[in-house]
Image: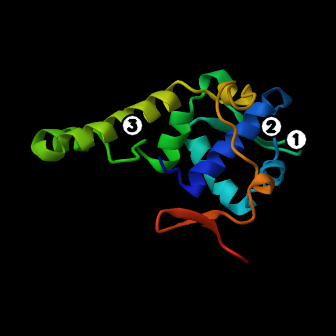
Amino acid sequence: MKISQKGLYALQAMMTLARRYHQGAIHIHDIAYEEGLPEKFLELILLELKNARMVESVRGPKGGYQLRRPPSEIYLSEIIRLIDGAIAPFGDADQLRGLISRDVEHGGLYQVFLDVRDAAARILENTTLADVLTYKGPKAGKRQRKKKAELPGVLPMVVHGSARKEAK
């Protein structure tokens, strides 16, 4: 699934508002600074979230933006659908179902795409801002990714079936 830069900024801003939910309104400058987001672009995103009644603005010297609902009642799918449209890494579900029935030769492939789309949508529809706030890192038993500093400087290269290292 691909989320636009605007969608990512919206999610980051909503995470900041969720983290600081009990602190009242947060000034847009503070959100932008905390998340490293362009303030002018963030203004447009927050206006869109406000029009969708996900956030509300508070005027005055202690004004800013705050969530209209608790973080436990705001699902990631709501935010993504508002900003980026349908959650569809491979096209919308109805389009894929049509392809499955019309293109029998490739129906199995389209069914896999539909399953991936449905799984991604299900996760986003069942994950709230509060859930993301409580994330503690990779689950036990999962392979850990190496940090950039741990990656070898020279990667092995396969040439005619044998691995050799390229000299710098």
Calculate the distance from the C-alpha at mark 1 to the C-alpha at mark 3. Answer: 44 Å
In terms of image quadrants, where is residue 43?
bottom right
Residue 69 visible in this rendered orientation of the protein: no
How is the rendered protein coloured? rainbow
Residue 17 - label = none
Calculate the distance from the C-alpha at mark 2 to the C-alpha at mark 1. Answer: 7 Å
Q: Is residue 47 above or below residue 120?
A: below
Residue 116 - label = 3
Q: Amino acid at mark 2?
A: Ala
Q: Position of residue 90 (x, y in %)?
A: 35, 47
Q: Residue at x 42, y 31 (%)?
A: 119
Q: Quadrant of the C terminus?
A: bottom right
Q: Residue furthest bottom?
A: 168
- Circle nearer the N terminus (3, 2): 2
Q: Amino acid at mark 3?
A: Val
Secondary structure under badge 3?
Answer: helix
The residue singled out by tag 1 in the image is 62
Secondary structure under badge 2?
Answer: loop
Q: Position of residue 70 (x, y in %)?
A: 68, 23
- Circle nearer the N terminus (2, 1): 2
Residue 123 visible in this rendered orientation of the protein: yes
Residue 25 - label = 2
Q: Is residue 16 left or right of residue 88?
A: right
> Quick one: 52 or 162, which is closer to the camera?
162
Q: Position of residue 57 (x, y in %)?
A: 71, 41
Q: Amino acid at mark 1?
A: Lys
Do tag 3 and tag 2 residues touch (Cβ < 8 Å)?
Answer: no
Q: Residue at x 68, y 39 (%)?
A: 14
